[in-house]
Image (spheres, helix red, strand yellow):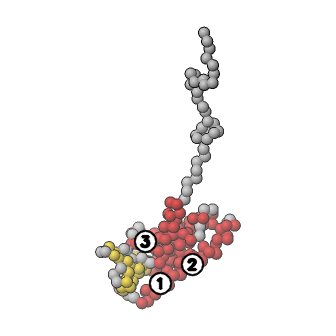
Amino acid sequence: MSERSRAGLPGFAFVVFLILALDQATKLFVAWSMYPGQSIPVLGDFFRWTFVFNKGAAFGIQLGGRWTFVVVTSMVTVFLVVHFLRSARPVFRGWPMALILGGALGNLVDRVRLGEVVDFIHLSAGGYSWPVFNVADMGISIGVGLIALAVLRAKEPEPPELPGEGGEIGQVVVESPGDRSGERGHEA
């Protein structure tokens, strides 16, 4: 583990556990105060608490059974931790990776404990309804978005200037044989 990784580990761990704790606390609150399928308006139809169980991936995408998700999420978790510890690129350290890891662990806890994920945040506008999601999904989505933004904003390194490409070094001046300005002509 590099010195930089060791120095950033407490902050990284704090964000991971903060997302995990918020995710699990909100899911427990919803499970204790609502029944599955119940929907409570918070801001009219735009924002509702809607308690559902999700057997699929993010936003209800179906990719396999319970243990497929557990194995894949565990592999992603190991990859993220190893990548954090080895990466020298700041974008792949800190907040974005911690948000993704905290979200992945939040949904993993549900899958191991319940066999499915508790979702409850429901947004809709103009007749369109976004799939119900949770705090873990928010952490994952925001983390991925921050990484994508950083990658898009990263400047490509300037390629080195090759000799003969606009600089003085290596510049070749070609004169035509008839162009001898300053020379006297011969008389016959």
Q: Amino acid at mark 3?
A: Ala
Report how far apart the C-alphas of labels 2 and 1 lie in the structure. Answer: 14 Å
Residue at point 36%, 86% (across, down):
40
Percent x, y of residue 124:
35, 76
Q: Which mark is residue 26?
A: 1
- Residue 17 is marked as 2
Frontmost residue, 175 versus 170:
175
Disc 3 packing (10 Å; few <14; some 14–19; many ≥20): many
Q: Mark 2: which secondary structure?
A: helix
Q: Are marks 3 and 2 in contact (CB under 8 Å)?
A: no
**Residue 160 against residue 101 in the figure, above or below:** above
- Amino acid identity at mark 1: Thr
- For label 2, the crowd category at 10 Å Cα-Cα, with few meaning under 14, some 14 to 19 and many 20 or more, is some
**Which element type, helix, strand or loop, lies under badge 1?**
helix
Image marks 3 and 1: residues in contact by CB distance under 8 Å: no
Question: Can residue 145 be seen?
Answer: yes
Q: Position of residue 64 (x, y in %)?
A: 41, 68
Q: In which image quadrant can residue 161 be found?
A: top right
Quarter that holds the C terminus: top right
In the displayed image of the protein, which residue is found farthest to the top? Answer: 188
**Quick one: which residue is furthest to the left in this view?**
127
Per the rendering, the mark at residue 58 is: 3
2 or 1: tag closer to the N-terminus = 2
Vertical side of 64 occupied by 162: above or below: above
- Vertical comparison of 169 with 94: above or below: above
Q: Residue at x 60, y 62 (%)?
A: 89
Q: Residue furthest bottom?
A: 33
Asked where in the image residue 178 lies, by quadrant, the reply is: top right
Q: Quadrant of residue 13?
A: bottom right
